[in-house]
Amino acid sequence: MLDERSKTILSYLVKECSEGSYRVIESNELLAALPKKFKPDEGTVTLCMEYLEKGNYISIKYKDAKMYCVSPLPFARQILENESNEQEKSKKFFRLASILYILVFVCAFLGTFVAIILYGLIF
């Protein structure tokens, strides 16, 4: 399971590297990709890159103190695609649940209204 920092770096790498190609990326670029709420530094980037490499999300051909030659693996692309699909499904489910809730409310209101009118006509 990826944490938010690793996921952010991984999505940046997938966006920057074309399929199957290696790209030289400076650690400053990765620092800029991380939001300020994580308070990123060089150590954070190094830890995230090591974690992604050990988890077989990325392949590092060369690494230096400030540069990486990296390529995302197909597993990483698949993970990010599955995540986006799950987010889409949850949005659709929330939208459907909201519509259903409003529909039930309206039907209950109309049913009560009709029942009161029928009661008034009969009695």
Image (spheres, rainbow, N blue to C red):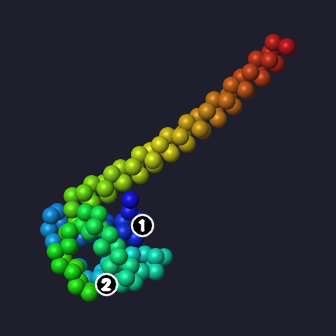
Label 2 neighbourhood size at 10 Å, few (<14), some (14-19), many (20+)? few
- Residue shown at 27% from the left, 54% from the top: 78
The image position of residue 30, as x and y in percent, is: 32, 78
The image position of residue 19, as x and y in percent, is: 17, 63
Which quadrant holds the C terminus? top right
Q: How many angstroms separate mark 2 from mark 1 (CA)?
A: 18 Å
Q: As shown in the figure, which amino acid type bears the numbered disc 1?
A: Glu
The image position of residue 24, as x and y in percent, is: 19, 79
Left or right relative to 75: residue 106:
right
Q: How many marks?
A: 2
Query: Residue tagged by mark 1?
Result: 4
* On screen, residue 3 above or below 115: below
The residue most toward the top is 122
Label 1 neighbourhood size at 10 Å, few (<14), some (14-19), many (20+)? few
**Which image quarter: residue 111?**
top right
**Which image quarter: residue 76?**
bottom left
Mark 2, secondary structure of its residue: helix
Query: Residue tagged by mark 2?
Result: 28
Q: Depth check: give the residue in front, 94 or 99.
A: 94
Mark 1, secondary structure of its residue: helix
- Residue shown at 61% from the left, 33% from the top: 104
Left or right relative to 9: residue 116:
right
Sequence-wise first label, 2 or 1: 1
The residue most toward the right is 123
**Which image quarter: residue 107?**
top right
The residue most toward the front is 54
* On screen, residue 35 above or below 75: below
